[in-house]
Amino acid sequence: MDLTHEYIHHRRGYRFGAGVCWIRIYGAEPGDAPIVVCEELPNLGDMVEMSGNLAAEVIAEHFTDGLPDLPRPILWIEHRPRRRGPGRHFLLTFPDYTPHPENAGFVRRVTLGQPIREPLTLKEVAILIGE
């Protein structure tokens, strides 16, 4: 897998520092799902509550031509670092992979819905991203 994008993503909204994470996107071979690693940054809010929003924003921004027609069209890996050690990794599965509006309000947000988290080992993450 080739790393195609790496940047700090700021969640849309009006709360400063809420939903800031480090995004790494790995391109996929034809017929495979791209991989996104979303890493929580220390002291900038808990991304657990906003994973559906973050994923929807990244998909809307980087995959405008659509995702592959697969049961899981994108592999979204969440990394929660710890002070010591590699931290914890999770593979997230969303109920829908098409960004849709969430709660009409002051700030228009999109979401993929509430994800299901499956723990991943560091070895599994390395295999998925080809390291």
Image (cartoon, grey):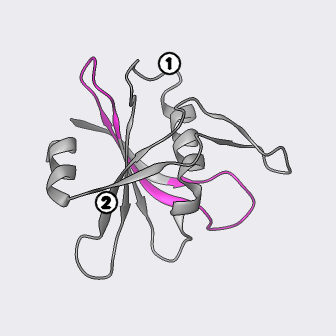
Q: Which mark is residue 110?
A: none
Residue 2: x %, y % from top left = 23, 35
The picture quadrant where one finds residue 72 is: top left
Asked if residue 56 is positioned above or below residue 11 in the image, the reply reads above
Helix, strand or loop at mark 1: loop
The residue positioned 15% from the left and 45% from the top of the image is: 127
Measured as percent of width and height from the top left, residue 44 is found at 54, 72
| Residue 80 lies within the magenta run | no
Residue 79 vs residue 116, the one in the foreground: 116
Tell me, yes or no, whether the highlighted magenta stretch contains residue 33.
Answer: yes
Q: Residues within 10 Å of mark 1 (few under 14, many from 20)?
A: few
For the residue marked with disc 1, what is the amino acid? Asp
Q: Which residue is mark 2?
A: 89
The residue wearing badge 1 is: 65
Locate the N terminus and report the quarter of the image it occupies: top left
Looking at the image, tell me whether mark 1 or mark 2 is earlier in sequence order: 1
Comparing labels 1 and 2, the label whose residue is closer to the camera? 2
The number of numbered badges drawn on the structure is 2
Residue range corresponding to the magenta coloring: 9-35
